[in-house]
Image (cartoon, rainbow, N blue to C red):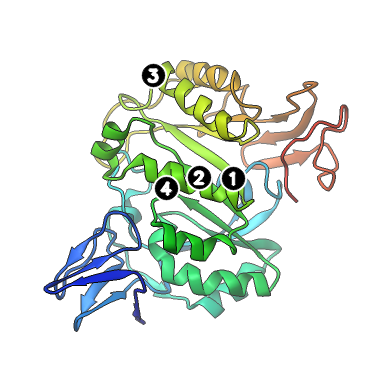
Amino acid sequence: MRAVPVPYFSDRGERIVCEVCPVHCALREGEEGVCRGRKVVNGVLVATNYGQVVAEHIDPVEKKPLYHFFPGSTVYSVGPNGCNFHCRWCQNCEISQGSVPTYSLLPDQLAERAVQHSSIGMAYTYTEPLIWYETLRDTMPLVHEVGGKNIIVSNGYIEEAPLQDLLRFIDAANIDLKSLDRSRHMKQTGGDVAVVQHTIQQLLDAGIHLEITHLLVTDFADKAESVDSIASWIASLDRRIPLHLSRYYPRHKASSPATSLEFLEQAWSIASNHLDFVYIGNANLKVGADTVCPSCGETAIRRSGYAAEILFDPGAGCCPSCGADLNVRT
């Protein structure tokens, strides 16, 4: 295992404070941060998760989910152990809230894999990729050098300085927006949603393709008012941002029943009042799968599961019938 120094920290004598994310773990010698990726060793804060991989697969880009970024493509996907949130309903709890044996793939090895098997690049996903900051910092430029794209699937919980280091190398992002209620968000995740909102704004300002996921957790995010609030806020940034409303299933420490199909359809209808592109994930419904032109109603991309049938010229990025912008990047 190779451990590298963490560049963002402050030394407070007996404790070293990690400043990669806003949790700001204050660690004594031998202690590990909440994300389990950083530790004080011989008085130095090091990234013990550097190049440590818990899972790797070739996935459809739609699985991230990204529906408007190289639709129909595949992307090499990789992630570490750990997370800096502690959501009770975590859908990947074995690897994000627990520790699974890892193996080492250093940045040059990861970049080499990024463009194999017709992959468009690298997706940093499965757990929380931004806790893998040092690995991303060193891998992303190499992925660009071999002609690949960099995708993050993230909770967006990172400090400004390390985020700025990564922005010029990120091509697309899906950010999980759990709630806009700051007190409820902090209680259930351990993080301040204002930071997540700032990250979303920074991604947009940098011209990075952005899509947002909102998990409709029963007894937490299953109210019409909260869906309306989130969709309205996203629309205030850009109504063309795709929103993925995802069905929750009981996992980890959450035992509430799965999101009802009736509420999924209701949520889709509410969000569609604000946004041009609203999708439903983790459920097989008649609505929320296809990409439909918001101007004329023409279907541009037809989907079945993760399979995408492209019904327009993706190079043009606009509706074949009326020429409206579909916010699709290829």
Name the kind of residue labelled 2 in the image. Answer: Ile
Q: Which residue is mark 3?
A: 223
Viewport quadrant of the N terminus: bottom left
Q: CA distance from mark 1 to mark 4?
A: 13 Å
Q: Earlier in the sequence, mark 1 or mark 2?
A: 2
Q: Nearer the viewer, mark 4 or mark 2?
A: 2
Q: Secondary structure at mark 1?
A: strand
Q: Earlier in the sequence, mark 3 or mark 1?
A: 1
- Cβ atoms at labels 1 and 2 below 8 Å apart: yes
Q: CA distance from mark 1 to mark 2?
A: 8 Å
Name the kind of residue labelled 4 in the image. Answer: Asn
- Residue at x 64%, y 30% (from the top left corner): 277
- Cβ atoms at labels 4 and 2 below 8 Å apart: no
Q: Secondary structure at mark 4?
A: loop
Q: CA distance from mark 4 to mark 2?
A: 10 Å
Q: CA distance from mark 2 to mark 3?
A: 23 Å
Q: Secondary structure at mark 3?
A: loop
Tell me if 56 is positioned left or right of 184 in this view: right
Q: Secondary structure at mark 2?
A: helix
Q: Earlier in the sequence, mark 1 or mark 4?
A: 4
Q: Earlier in the sequence, mark 4 or mark 3?
A: 4
Mark 1 Cα-neighbour bin, 10 Å: few <14, some 14–19, many ≥20: many
Name the kind of residue labelled 3 in the image. Answer: Lys
Q: CA distance from mark 3 to mark 1?
A: 25 Å
Q: Which residue is mark 2?
A: 200
Q: Picture coordinates of residue 32 (x, y %)?
A: 21, 67
